[in-house]
Image: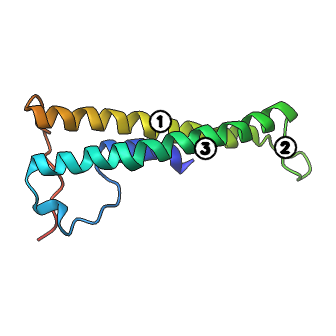
């Protein structure tokens, strides 16, 4: 279920990041890094995992898979959370890339700015 919060964490810049050099770069350099990371890593991985986990969910749904415990619960709702969570992460990643492109063109300035390291 925590996967459903991954897009929310990305939106609020609450995800884990190693800020050794990143925080000291100018805003436009950080935007370029975020665009590259989003296009080269975030979107491909999120789409791939969402795509590959969909058949797992569909199989579980088709056979009505349940827990082996007596009176076990259905498993397919939980298995749906994997492709759904990564699909939501991909959508938020796309929104972040669009915002970073707007930063580069000067059409957008983040209200909260970029996260700065604690000093």
- 10 Å neighbourhood of mark 1: few (<14), some, or many (≥20)? many
| Comes first in the chain, label 2 or label 3 | 2
Q: Check the image and name the residue furthest to the right.
A: 70
Task: Report helix, strand or loop for mark 3.
Answer: helix
Residue 6: image x %, image y %? 44, 47
Q: CA distance from mark 3 to mark 1?
A: 10 Å
Relative vertical location of residue 83 with respect to residue 114 in this rendering, above or below: above
User: Residue at image x 60%, y 37%?
Assistant: 51
Residue 65: image x %, image y %? 84, 41
Q: Which mark is residue 88?
A: 1
Residue 67: image x %, image y %? 84, 49
Q: Is residue 66 left or right of residue 95?
A: right
| Comes first in the chain, label 3 or label 1 | 3
User: Residue at image x 44%, y 40%?
Assistant: 89
User: Residue at image x 81%, y 43%?
Assistant: 73
Q: CA distance from mark 2 to mark 3?
A: 17 Å
According to the picture, the residue beneath numbered tag 2 turns out to be 66
| Comes first in the chain, label 2 or label 1 | 2
Q: How is the image coloured?
A: rainbow
Nearest to viewer (mark 2 / mark 3): 3
When asked about the image quadrant of residue 58, the answer is top right
- 10 Å neighbourhood of mark 3: few (<14), some, or many (≥20)? many
User: Residue at image x 57%, y 40%?
Assistant: 50
According to the picture, the residue beneath numbered tag 3 turns out to be 82
When asked about the image quadrant of residue 61, the answer is top right
Q: Is residue 5 left or right of residue 76?
A: left
Q: CA distance from mark 2 to mark 1?
A: 26 Å
Task: Report helix, strand or loop for mark 2.
Answer: loop
Task: Report helix, strand or loop for mark 1.
Answer: helix
When asked about the image quadrant of residue 119, the answer is bottom left
Q: Is residue 40 left or right of residue 62?
A: left
């Amino acid at each position: 279920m925590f996967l459903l919060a991954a897009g929310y964490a990305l939106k609020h810049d609450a995800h884990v990041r190693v800020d050794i050099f990143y925080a000291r770069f100018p805003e436009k350099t950080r935007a370029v890094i975020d665009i590259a990371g989003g296009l080269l890593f975030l979107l491909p991985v999120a789409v791939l995992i969402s795509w590959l986990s969909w058949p797992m969910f569909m199989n579980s749904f088709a056979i009505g898979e349940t827990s082996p415990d007596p009176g076990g619960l259905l498993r397919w709702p939980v298995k749906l959370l994997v492709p759904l969570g990564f699909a939501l992460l991909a959508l938020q990643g796309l929104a972040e890339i669009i915002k970073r492109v707007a930063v580069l063109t000067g059409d957008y300035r983040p209200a909260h700015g970029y996260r700065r390291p604690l000093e």
